[in-house]
Amino acid sequence: VPKLKPQELEARRLEIIAAARACFLRNGFHQTTTDQICKEASITPGGLYHYFRGKDDIITAVIEHTTQQTVAKLRAAAEEPDDIGSAFRELAQFLFTTMRDPDIDNIVRLDMEVWVEGLKNEKLAKISRESWGIRRQVLERFIRRSIDEGLYQPGVVEEKAFAGLLMAILIGLRVGKLVWKEDFDLNGAMRMLFMMQSGRLSTTLPPLEVPPK
Amino acid sequence: VPKLKPQELEARRLEIIAAARACFLRNGFHQTTTDQICKEASITPGGLYHYFRGKDDIITAVIEHTTQQTVAKLRAAAEEPDDIGSAFRELAQFLFTTMRDPDIDNIVRLDMEVWVEGLKNEKLAKISRESWGIRRQVLERFIRRSIDEGLYQPGVVEEKAFAGLLMAILIGLRVGKLVWKEDFDLNGAMRMLFMMQSGRLSTTLPPLEVPPK
């Protein structure tokens, strides 16, 4: 490996991460070999080893990098300074952009592979949990702000629980789209979600309670 | 294989399905061998082959059998004859029972393995899609009944889209519980879901629209 300046090393590292992500999205985590990543990144196996010790290290870097990028966009939407109404619309827009990404099915396939792999690899599971935890915290702060600005009922809306529900719904929509294919009306489901969250499904529904465990 | 009457054959088949399901839940789909299933079901490989041609055939039977049982319970709750309010409470109870099943994490792990496997095995993907489709149809009929009985707003609530959303939420809660572990407040998320669906999050939220694709 030729001597590189720190910023050159970092730029090369990011190129390898981008190449690896492209391979994982195209062929899945298990089907991708480090040889394919080397070819995609135009690097030798020895060169790759200088940056990453193996596939687990690479997928960790891919998850961390994707999370940073996603969280930056999510934060920009949720922390939209003008007013909370614009922030709501920006977050909705973020949802549409994410769900309509041409790569979304491959992204969700990779998520599912990482979840399954994480069931027997606690280090990977931890990285994956953290990456979702960081997204959830942005939503928590947004919900807190919505309560403070009078949009959500204080004492009813619990920011951590509600952020967790929203993350679960996001996951469910993504999995539904990938797994149920044309059986799943994604646009209709998002329409119903917006109707539900703004309380427009019904004027007469009785409350239901979650019994203690 | 000794000569068995049709009802004996069917009883033995159900025993094998139960044994296979126990193996799949314990060790996952990929880790389970047909030898383990034979041992669990006290049958020889030749005997097993008389009922199923291989692991794909067995997992198909397990999915179909589980779906039948789940749908029977779901239908009993959703078609609760007395009044729609009781049916709502019965369905909520069904959700709690499902999410608090001691085996739930293993059940969801198996679901995820089947989804990932289904991405390269269209026959398995079809069985999996159908099994969720049958559940969704029960919810669709329940939502139709709720509209007819005046609980949901006609013209706002679309039964297929709303049933799809509810299925996606169910999937998201299950995956969240398995993957996010103690980071995920399942009870809190269910509480927020009930608040959301009965319109209690807010009195002032503006409606959001899903833009055309």
Image (cartoon, coloured by chain):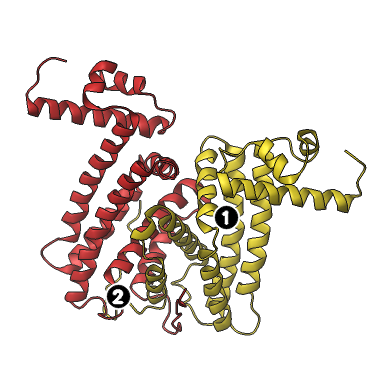
Chain colours: A yellow, B red
* Image position, residue A154 (x, y; %): 48, 75
Asked whether, in this view, residue A118 is left or right of residue B97, the answer is: right
Q: Is A209 situated above or below B201? A: above
* Residue B31 left/right relative to A44: left
**Residue that badge 1 annotates:** A132
Q: Residue at x 30, y 20 (%)?
A: B38
Compare residues B32 and A23 and report the one nearer the observer: A23
Q: Looking at the picture, which amino acid does disc 1 mark?
A: Trp
Q: Position of residue A40 (x, y in %)?
A: 70, 45
Residue A28 lies in quadrant: top right
Residue name at image x 37 percent, y 78 percent = A199
Is residue A106 rendered to the left or right of residue B66? right
Give the vertical position of A84 relative to B34 (above or below). below
Q: CA distance from mark 2 to mark 1?
A: 31 Å
Quadrant showing the N terminus of chain B? top left
* Mark in front: 2 vs 1: 2
Chain at numbered mark 1: A
The residue at 64%/44% (across/down) is A59
Q: Which residue is mark 2?
A: B157
Task: Name the kind of residue labelled 2 in the image.
Answer: Val
- Neighbor class of circle 1 (other Cα within 10 Å; few <14, some 14-19, many 20+) is some
Could you say which is closer to the camera, residue B3 or residue B84?
Answer: B3
Disc assigned to residue B38? none
A61 or A165, which is in the foreground? A61
Mark 1 lies on a secondary structure that is helix
Q: Chain of mark 2?
A: B
Which secondary structure lies at badge 2? loop
